[in-house]
Amino acid sequence: MKDSVKTGFSFGLTSGIITTLGLMIGLHSGTHSRSAVMGGILTIAIADAFSDALGIHISEESRNAHGAKEVWESTLATFATKFIVALSFIGPVVLLPLATAMVVSILWGVSLLTALSIHLANQQRIPRWKVAMEHVLIAGVVVVLTHYVGKWIAESLH
């Protein structure tokens, strides 16, 4: 895989998992509303995928280390990956009871993140468990924090 595509793919995948899970968990904790959670996922898939793609685009341009073709490859890979990953969380929300969908979504996100982490660790020839634990721990912090922020907001409004 080309470095430019790898950059966009790894960024889009990680951001798609962390951002979507964080928003889903926060919205669920604060509203317990299927439509709010689905709206959040679609918002991430569209607005945040464009935002991240533009962020990668500008970041790559500012480095002045790659040509226009590579910059656009990173941009498009970021958008496509973030969009697809975010949308992949819709299925459980549509098909399962909402509380179950949150658990399934967390497991899905952790599985994707672990697979990426193992791949990266293998490429760098470093212990897989260290890389996977670091990345999953960060995802766990996001899930816990957004859960409590959602609950706090819901309680503050009542």
Image: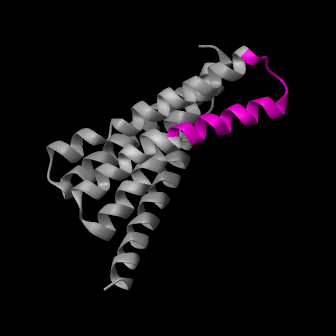
Q: 154 or 141: which is nearer to us?
A: 154
Among the 4 quarters of the image, the one containing residue 76: top right
Judged left or right of residue 113, residue 39 is left
Compared with residue 63, is residue 90 higher up or lower down, i.e. above or below?
below
Residue 117 visible within the image: no
Judged left or right of residue 27, residue 131 is right
Q: Quadrant of the N terminus?
A: top right
Instruction: Say whether residue 56 is magenta.
Output: yes
Among the 4 quarters of the image, the one containing residue 140: bottom left
* Residue 143 image position (x, y, % from top left): 42, 59
* Residue 32 image position (x, y, % from top left): 24, 65
Compared with residue 50, is residue 152 higher up or lower down, i.e. above or below?
below
Residue at 19% over, 53% down:
100
Residue at 19% over, 44% down:
94
* Residue 23 image position (x, y, % from top left): 41, 56
Q: Which residues are magenta?
A: 49-68
What colour scheme governs how the chains and residues are painted in the rendered image of this protein?
Answer: one colour
Q: 81 or 53: which is nearer to us?
A: 53
Q: Quadrant of the C terminus?
A: bottom left
Residue at 53% over, 34% down:
12
Judged left or right of residue 52, residue 84 is left
Q: 23 or 118: which is nearer to us?
A: 23
Compared with residue 70, is residue 9 higher up or lower down, i.e. above or below?
below
Instruction: Say whether residue 60 is magenta.
Output: yes
Magenta stretch: dominant secondary structure: helix
Residue 155 visible within the image: yes
Judged left or right of residue 94, residue 15 is right
Q: 89 or 45: which is nearer to us?
A: 45
